[in-house]
Amino acid sequence: MPSMHPLWQLTAARFREFLREPEAVFWVFAFPVLLTCALGLAFRSQGRPDVIAGIMAGPAAVTLEQTLTKEPGVRVRVLDRAGADEALRHGAIHVLVIPGSPVTYELDPSRPESRVGRYVVDERIQAAAGRQSAVPVSERLVSVPGSRYIDWVVPGLLGMNIMGTGMWSVGFSVVQARTRKLLKRLMATPMQRSHFLLAQMLARLIFLILEVGALLGFARLVFGIPINGSWLTLTGFCLLGAVTFSGLGLLVASRAKTVEGVSGLVNLVMVPMWIFSGVFFASENFPDPMQPFISLLPLTALNEALRGVMIDGVGIRALASQAAILSSWLVVSFVAALKLFRWR
Amino acid sequence: MPSDTSTALQCSGLVKRYGDVLAVDGLNLEVQRGECFGLLGPNGAGKTTTIEILEGLLAADAGDVQVLGMRWNTDAARLRQRLGIQLQETQLNDKLSVEEIVRLFRSFYTQGPTVKAVIASVGLESKRKAWYSKLSGGQKQRLALACALVGNPDLLFLDEPSTGLDPQSRRQVWDLLRGFKEQGKTILLTTHYMDEAQALCDRVAIVDRGKVIAQGTPLELIASLGAEHVVSFALREGVEVPGDETLRALPGVRRASLHDAGGTLIVSHLHEALPALLRAVAVPDAFTLLTTHSATLEDVFVSLTGRQLREE
């Protein structure tokens, strides 16, 4: 006989409902893993992208093609005039080489990869013609875990996922119970209201263990994402983030009467944070006057804390302000949600 | 002490206003322990508002409510444990099974039958593992009843227990409710079906526009018409309908009401009234409709308000 405590029964009911909803399971578990995978593949060789050079078709093209493809890092396409123009416009080639004397490079200087391509191609052609370096040089290529884009983006994805699951799982299930008159039916039993709300949180925390486990496990296994700080601090911030965003989910769901209504509110809260809070690109890209506001957003605080722990390996003391920002959002959203909440 | 009194529920001077609309207008009720009491009235009469006030889900603007000798503002927690409630239009969790839903509701009550026994009492044993979304309308309604019964309540509130069900499912729900009545439970139900009130209720209050307009056993209410039969008729176009006075003067007719091309007679002696009506019309093939039935609560409602219970 399973425990008959109402809190346990409510939590189990919520958890079962979630697991039996294939779409929810996809968005919480599979989607972030797929996104990580896609971003990891797209940016896998970010330190050394290939140069794509076009060669104008002609008698000298064959020799030049052999010269340029001798070493890795340069890909070559032989094109006629019209094809070359189109390829340049679309960025399908970074630079066009027209053999002759002089050799002519055609490129769009506003594209950084084109300017790099011009110098890489020129270096090859000059070396093949016998030019020696005046000063001997050597280079060290840095591609250690912790400095790649994927290392930077995974904590952001984790933060985004904690936000999304928290807001959707709580907001959606509460509003659905309201529209189905299930909330009202529960009010007609001796159930304690606090048990209902607490069960939403508890079920949320069970999903959290699973979703953080899936995403971090995948990112570590496949991309070797480092976790330089303490696991305990990381766990603490995941919990704090999850509870904070559940509180926001409860707040947006406190009055909404329809699922459409709450969806709009959830997006209204989340979309700006996807953009401003440094999920896919650093929030420092926004102008300085905006920075104080951006840093007060809960997802900014969570992402900074997760990156601090995972990449920089700093402890809780260095992340006190982030913890304070998240806690404030937690308290404010809960108090407001409980004040506004409609049970009918 | 609540358990000494024979009154299960009592309310007086109940008023509930929604903006300008007066949903409940000074309503009084008294329900005895062990009886099945019905609030009968058309949609929008204020039945649901009334029952939700009695259930402690809505606050009244004025009036006094006592349930099992207790009051909502002082004894809510204790009262909740002793009531079984079934609301209109509740949809339970689609992706939980019958057993999981009953267990969830059972966990809220300190005492009551086992989950298995409750499921058996509404005849859903074979559906124990089925998800709510896979149940038929009748099965959903029986599950809703099971959820109302998990705390072994002293008083059962049922809001439109058979609305939207097919005839066979209705019979099943009625049989279940008769079973609970036999266990001595008090039931307060609302319905807009006069046959449901007649089949289940010991006493009925007819509610219209937020007020009780008649109260008594179904038989008493029907007897108040002073007649046992109702004759309805309609005449084809061009045939003159006899006047009010003429009809009322026919032998065996107590009351008559006319509408468009026909009328309704409330009749004490059918064998006298019917031939008399045929003679009074006396045009060959004049009747397009001529039916008789035993008087029902519906006729009581019509004679009190001049309107049908179920207005489409």
Image (cartoon, rainbow, N blue to C red):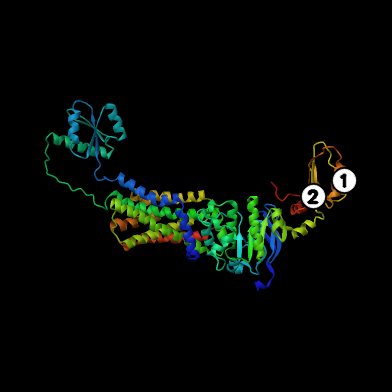
* Chain at tag 2: B
What type is the residue that disc 2 sits on?
Val
- Nearer the observer, disc 2 or disc 1? 2
* Chain at tag 1: B
Vertical relation: A132 (above or below) B87: above
Residue A272 vs residue A223: left or right? right
Q: Is residue A294 visible?
A: no
Dot 2: few (<14), some (14–19), or many (≥20) neighbours within 10 Å?
many
Mark 2 lies on a secondary structure that is: strand
Q: Position of residue A327 (x, y in %)?
A: 41, 61
Dot 1: few (<14), some (14–19), or many (≥20) neighbours within 10 Å?
few
Q: Is residue A308 visible?
A: yes
The residue under label 1 is B246
User: Looking at the rendering, in which quadrant would you find the N terminus of chain B?
Assistant: bottom right
In the rendered structure, find residue B190 and report the number of the disc placed on it: none
Q: Residue furthest front?
A: B126
Out of B174 and B87, give the one closest to the viewer: B174
* Same-subunit check for callouts 2 and 1: yes
- In terms of image quadrants, where is residue A299? bottom left
Q: Position of residue B248 (x, y in %)?
A: 86, 48
Vertical relation: A338 (above or below) A82: below
The mark that comes first in sequence, 2 or 1, is 2
Q: Position of residue A334 (x, y in %)?
A: 47, 60
Marks 2 and 1 close (CB-CB < 8 Å): no
What type is the residue that disc 1 sits on?
Thr
In the rendered structure, find residue B230 and report the number of the disc placed on it: 2
